[in-house]
Image (cartoon, grey):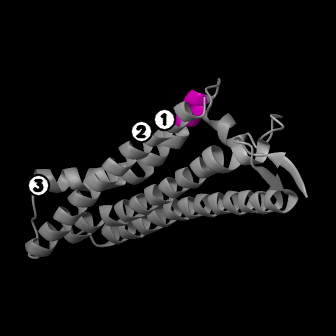
Amino acid sequence: MLNDAFPGGDLISEESRGNMLAEYAALRNEITTFLSLQVQFMNWSVVLGGAIAGLFIKNPSFELVALFPLPFLIFGLLYAEAAARIFRVANYIEIKLRPKLIYPADEPSLEWESFIRKKWELDPVLSMGDKWVRLAIFLVPSLVPIIWLMCNGPQSHHWRLVGSLFTLEFILLFLFLWMWVELQKYGKSLGKKTK
């Protein structure tokens, strides 16, 4: 039984509408899964960083200082990758799926993706938490030891290992910063697409 039309005149059936609603629900669930992963990445980076810091306090060594940024950078990259997947799913919902589901009724429905992209009074507060606090969770514990290593240079009898670790962390740091900047640009462009 046909009941609604797509833009362009094609009709969709109740079965198609049901399938699209099921797809919408599955995609929202996928976003929730990626959000849960992001929280786990933040938690694990703090836990591993705390464990490494505890080892350093108990037995200070230059190698532990060199190792400290690694979990924050790796989990920061995984966090950014999950954020990119969330953006991709949200963009698909907003741009591809939602218009098919609400046409031709033109009644307000399935508007969460549009709503969260609009400017409103709490944007500065949410932006602070969403962008800067989360960035600081991964960046500050990574930068302090890297800066310290840059100023002091490898001072252990394992200087090749420490130097290699430092080089890897420096590469991961720039990759993380590049991903973060690209995600911020993409997030801003999504807000412009849906206005």
Quadrant in the picture for the N terminus: bottom right
135 sits to left or right of 90: left
Residue highlighted by disc 1: 188
Q: Amino acid at mark 2?
A: Lys
**Could you say where residue 136 lies in the image, as x and y percent from the top left?**
42, 46
How busy is the neighbourhood of tag 3: few (under 14 within 10 Å), some, or many (20 plus)? few
Does residue 125 belong to the magenta stretch? yes
Q: Amino acid at mark 1?
A: Lys
**Could you say where residue 126 lies in the image, as x and y percent from the top left?**
59, 35
| CA gap, disc 1 and disc 3 | 39 Å
Q: Which mark is residue 177?
A: none
Q: Residue at x 9, y 71 (%)?
A: 159
The residue lying toward the viewer, choosing from 36 and 59, is 36
The residue lying toward the viewer, choosing from 151 and 164, is 164
Q: Which residues are magenta?
A: 123-128
Q: Which mark is residue 185?
A: 2
Q: In front of the other: label 2 or label 3?
A: 2
